[in-house]
Image (tube, rainbow, N blue to C red):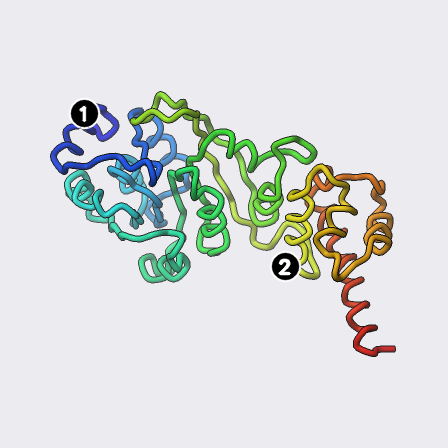
Amino acid sequence: MGLCDITVIREVLGRHGFHFSKSLGQNFLTAQWVPDRIAAECGADPGTGVLEVGPGMGCLTLELCKRAGKVVAVELDRALLPVMAETLTGCENVEIVQGDILKTDISGLCREKFGDMPVHACANLPYYITSPAISALLDSGAFESITVMVQKEVAERICAATGTSEYSAFSVYVQYYAEAEILFDVPRSCFVPQPKVDSAVLRFKPRKAPAVETCDEKLFFAIVRAAFNQRRKTLANAVQTAFSRKLDKAEVLELVRSCGFDERIRGERLGLAEFARFANLAAERLKEKNYSEAGGD
């Protein structure tokens, strides 16, 4: 019997007086095929390391350490440390770090623990930290690939196509930094306690450079957020509302027309390249205005 066996789960947790935390979104796997497949598809091999986020009882950790040269697992819940001390006994290439991944210097941790070894990330993410955790992992620039299990509807939003109801600012953010694909679905029946929704496993392959060139990355993402924060508005209205102190309506409409867009287009209809084109023109216009206001010729 393994760590995905419900009887083993109850016995081990019972010995340690462990109780599931709703606030931490804890659900443990009861289907061995799930950690087996994640470990097989995450890219781990003897020449690489794996940073695992949220190891729980260690069922995925056990499979990862069979494939990777080293596994470092970051766990927030201190109550699970003695549990893993039991379940991971004998796993000499595994190190457990207690901490909050959202408050961790991820690139620094990887340098400290893995040195020059290529590193992959694996994570089983509760809903309440899905977006910030994925952002933190991508922003770190530390990984060859990132494989995460999230709610199925979240996975679909992340990989959503332009113009669909699921398409969001986070979809654009992910596309900018990585290639993302849904590997497989995980039914809710594969967990204890059983959640109310199904899950899916996603794999991100970080890009060597962003997918599009931007003059001002901060402005690019500000425009993307503005477009989706008011997604029922036209792109022109949404951007003008967000940048009312810098651009008037006529200027925004001129930018829209200069991009070759219909004046009535909504931001949700723009792909990554279209957002970049609009943001780059906006950056040029703002630079011209600032120069003029500063007294330039």
N-terminal label among 1 and 2: 1
Residue at label 1?
1
Numbered disc total: 2
Spot occupied by residue 44 in the image (x, y as percentages of width and height) = 37, 43
List x then y, in percent, for residue 233: 74, 40
Local secondary structure at mark 2: helix
Q: Looking at the picture, how far across and down is residue 193, in whole percent?
A: 30, 27
The disc placed on residue 218 is 2
Q: Is residue 229 left or right of residue 125?
A: right
* Relative depth, front residue between 251 and 49: 251
Report the amino acid beneath label 1: Met
Q: Residue at x 67, y 48 (%)?
A: 226
Mark 2 is on which residue type? Lys
Q: Position of residue 223 (x, y in %)?
A: 69, 51
> Residue at position x 72%, y 48% from top?
275
Foreground residue, 124 or 265? 265
Q: Is residue 190 above or below residue 48?
A: above
Q: Nearer the viewer, mark 1 or mark 2?
A: 2
